Image (cartoon, helix red, strand yellow):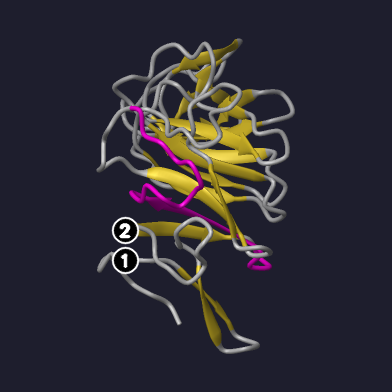
Amino acid sequence: GVTDTNNVSDIFLYDRDTTTNQLVSHAAGLPNATADYDSYSMDMSPTGEYVVLSSKASNLVTGQSDPNNNSESLNVFLWKRIGSETTLISRSFGIGNEATEANGFSFNSTVSSNGQYVTFDSSSSDLVDGQSGGNDIYNVFRFDQTTGEILLVSHGPGSPLAALGGYAPVINATGDSIFFRAGDAPLASGVVDRNGFWDLYVYSADTDSNAVVTRRAPALPGLTGNGFSDLP
C-alpha cells in the first residue's frame, strides 16, 4: 500500500479497467511512498501514459536540487506510467542540469497526446540559454521530451530569446500549436492592441512565431478585439 508521509495533496492515476489507483507523485525510486511536499494542477495524455503536474516536492527526481533554496517554489514534472518514472521539466538550462530546478515558479502545464511535448508557464529566467527579460513576469515555454530542449514561446517577432510575457498555455495533440493569453506586448507582427487587456495568441512551432487569435475581424487581422479575452 501507499505510505503517506506528507499529509498534503498528492496525485493518483485511476485505472477504470482494473479499478486501481497508482501513485503519481511518489518519491524517486519509491513508487508507494509519497513525495515530501504537495502536488497538484495536473494534465494527462489521452491514453493515460503521461501525466504532467506541478509540485513543491524536492524528491520526485533522483538528485533533485534547488540552488535557490526556495522550499515554496513550484516546479513542473512529467510522469511516465511505464516504469513510473518522473522527469523534471522546469529545469535550469545546461548539460548535467536535468535535476536542477529553475529559479522561478512554474505551473499551468499541459501535455501533447504522445507525451513528447509539455507546455507550461514560468517566472524563471534560466530555462533557456540567452533568455532576456521575463524576470518579473510569467512566460510560456515548450519542453521536448525527446531532445530535452526548452523553447521560449511568448517571444516577439524575430526575437526567440526576448521574453515578453504569457500565461495559461494549452498545447494541441501533436504539440506544434500552443494557445495562451498575453497582455499588450508585441508578440505578433503588425498587431495593434486596442483593449489594453489580455488577448489570446497561438504559437506555431513550424514557424516559431505567434499570431493573435482575438482579432477584430478577418478583414482587420492586425487589430485586437475591444475587450478582455481570458483562458484558451
Image coordinates for residue 11, horizontal then vertical, percent: 43, 66
- Magenta segment's dominant SS is loop
Q: Mark 2 points at which residue?
A: 38
Q: Based on the displayed image, in which of its 4 quarters is residue 45 positioned? A: bottom right
Q: In this view, does 227 lie to the left or right of 1?
A: left
Residue 98 placed where, x, y %? 56, 34
User: Which of 147/188 is in front?
Assistant: 147
Alpha carbon separation for disc pair 1 and 2: 5 Å
Residue 222 in the figure: left or right of residue 8: right
Q: Which amino acid does label 1 sit on?
A: Ser
Please indicate, yes or no, whether residue 181 appears anywhere in the rendered image: yes
Does dot 1 land on a helix, a strand or a loop?
Answer: loop
Q: Reading the chain from its start, which is encountered first: label 1 or label 2? A: 1
Residue 153 among magenta residues: no
Q: Position of residue 1 (x, y in %)?
A: 45, 82
Picture quadrant of residue 136: top left
Q: Is residue 62 magenta?
A: yes
Give the residue drawn at x 64%, y 48%.
Answer: 172
In front here: 87 or 113?
Answer: 87
Counting from the top left corner in percent of width and height, residue 46 is at: 65, 65
Q: Can residue 167 be seen from the camera position used here?
A: no
Say which amino acid is labelled 2: Asp
**Residue for point 48% across, 27% down:** 92
Residue where numbered disc 1 is placed = 9
